[in-house]
Image (cartoon, helix red, strand yellow):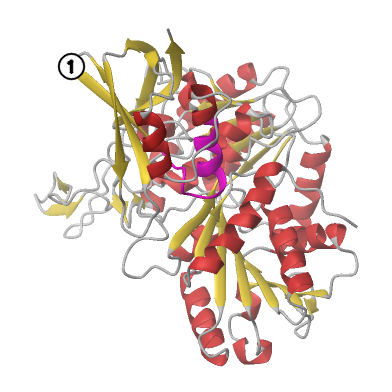
Amino acid sequence: MTLSLRPYQRAAIDALYSYFAEHTGNPLVIMPTGTGKSVVIAGFIREAIENYRDTRVLVLTHVKELIQQNFLALMRAWPEAPAGIYSAGLSRRDIRAQILFAGIQSIHRHAYKVQRCDLVLIDEAHLLGRGDSGMYRSFLAQLNEINAGLLKVVGFTATPYRLDSGMLHEGKDRLFTDIAYEVPVLDMIQQGYLSPVVPKQTDTQLDVAGVGSRGGEFIARDLEAAVDRDEVTRTAVKEIVHHGDGRGSWLVFCAGVAHALHVRDAIREHAITCEIVTGNTPGPERDRILAAFKAGRLRCVTNANVLTTGFDAPGVDLIALLRPTKSVGLYVQMVGRGTRLAEGKEDCLVLDFAGNTARHGPIDTVDGRRRQKGEEPGEAPIKVCPECQTINHASVRLCTACGHEFPPPEIKVASRAASDALLSIQQQSTWCEVSGITYDRHEKPGKPPSLRVTYRCGLASHSEWVCFEHTGYPREKACAWWRLRAPGNAIPTSVLEAQVAIDLKTLREPVAIRIRPAGQYTEIVGVRFG
């Protein structure tokens, strides 16, 4: 059976071949939720074994749903694949399989049972910056030692960020070393491979000004205490029900188990079928709820910290964010639950009561390298006991000296909440007349050179980088850039070739460019020729 790959999926596999032909590190493949990482994994495994018959592959992830999803994707593409599963949750331990799909919790102590392994593929690789990091690292270290330091590791993720907004392939303790391939979420939406996500202005907004942070994220206990307030929940739910009219599959992200339960009950009061899924939900009950939700028999599911990765429900056409987060990755993962395509689905409405879009910006321009506002070191927040004047940390409920009970933090409901753009194309763009253009070679350590194109627009200037010598999507984008400016002419393979053609006046030059905000910078999204 031949595996049918979309162009960007083929490009992702080719980019891995190119990477390993030139480098010895551990690369990342970055693909948005819903673009078929499991298909790319299946295609890469099949080709690797067909080219090198004795290759042994281990595919690791953290939840049984993803283990099964990746295994089935391979079996559909290659029914005769010598594949097995090692997962306590799936009651299988096929430790000798040439292609082994495994849960990290089940296999992390058994590197010496696995023995020979050439290639490890890690799905949802961003988790290496979080709770399961120690399991992955100790297991991979043992496995690499067993295999004489020749182990190759590839990470697949939609969000290559650590919890504190660092990139997975940067920093002293990094496991991954480079990005081998990345395809932007906006391109996938514009090409019809993903569903658009649409923001809607809401009247309710959670105020978390008094909630402290730890490790780059809101303190979970204090966050839930702040947002789990009956008057706020009822107001927000009323809006969810209003905007959800005509939409059939609602997913609500909450700040904790109690909060998710209270939101569920409030939704049920409007005669809407709704269930709750949390980490405490027994496996069979969870499976029953999610099966009913995916089948359309259940309209709404509220959840706390469990349906952000590895959850595939294409029909979701309304997402309500009642869970504020400082994590760029968590924000993108939550919104990403609504980007899958489904029959009859035109888009996914996102109601952000939590201010996450204002905090992080559009999902296609988020900056994983930038520290979040308020994370800089400063004075510890305090409050003074009115009974004994003892100074306490702001997070305590009882005075450490006399036991006085502080009132819960005040919750404010804003008169209007921000309706910030979820996609950069939803931001307002402007046309600027171009008064001059310069073309320069741009060097970045460890990367191929690129052509930096700078447009002077009055007193301002705006730049873009054209990557002729890169592979995958950056090269494809450079080709499209060149065809627009030099139709019919050969596309350069290097920056030097491009500069020679530019010197010969081969290129048409724009008289105006259209720009829009992109974080701290601007992005060029359109050109107009004279």
Q: Residue at x 41, y 20 (%)?
A: 417
Side of 190 relative to 223 (left or right): right
Of the pair 149 and 334, the residue shown nearer to us: 149
Question: What residue is disc 1 on?
Answer: 459
Of the pair 111 and 516, the residue shown nearer to us: 516
- Considering every residue shown, the one lying at the far left of the view is 389
Q: Magenta includes 476?
A: yes
Q: Position of residue 470 (x, y in %)?
A: 48, 49
- Considering every residue shown, the one lying at the far front of the view is 504
Provide the major secondary structure of the magenta segment: helix
Q: Quadrant of the C terminus?
A: top left
Q: Quadrant of the N terminus?
A: bottom right
Q: Position of residue 73 (x, y in %)?
A: 79, 57
Side of 24 relative to 165 (left or right): right
Name the amino acid type tagged 1.
Leu
| Above or below, 389 relative to 147 | above
Q: Quadrant of residue 116?
A: bottom right
| Above or below, 17 relative to 426 | below
| Above or below, 290 relative to 114 | above
Q: Quadrant of residue 43?
A: bottom right
Q: Position of residue 245 (x, y in %)?
A: 69, 17
Q: Quadrant of residue 190?
A: top right
The answer to whether one can see residue 211 in this image is no
Mark 1: secondary structure? loop
| Above or below, 333 relative to 507 | below
| Callout 1 crowding tier (Cα within 10 Å): few <14, some 14–19, many ≥20 | few
Q: Bounds of the magenta span?
A: 466-480
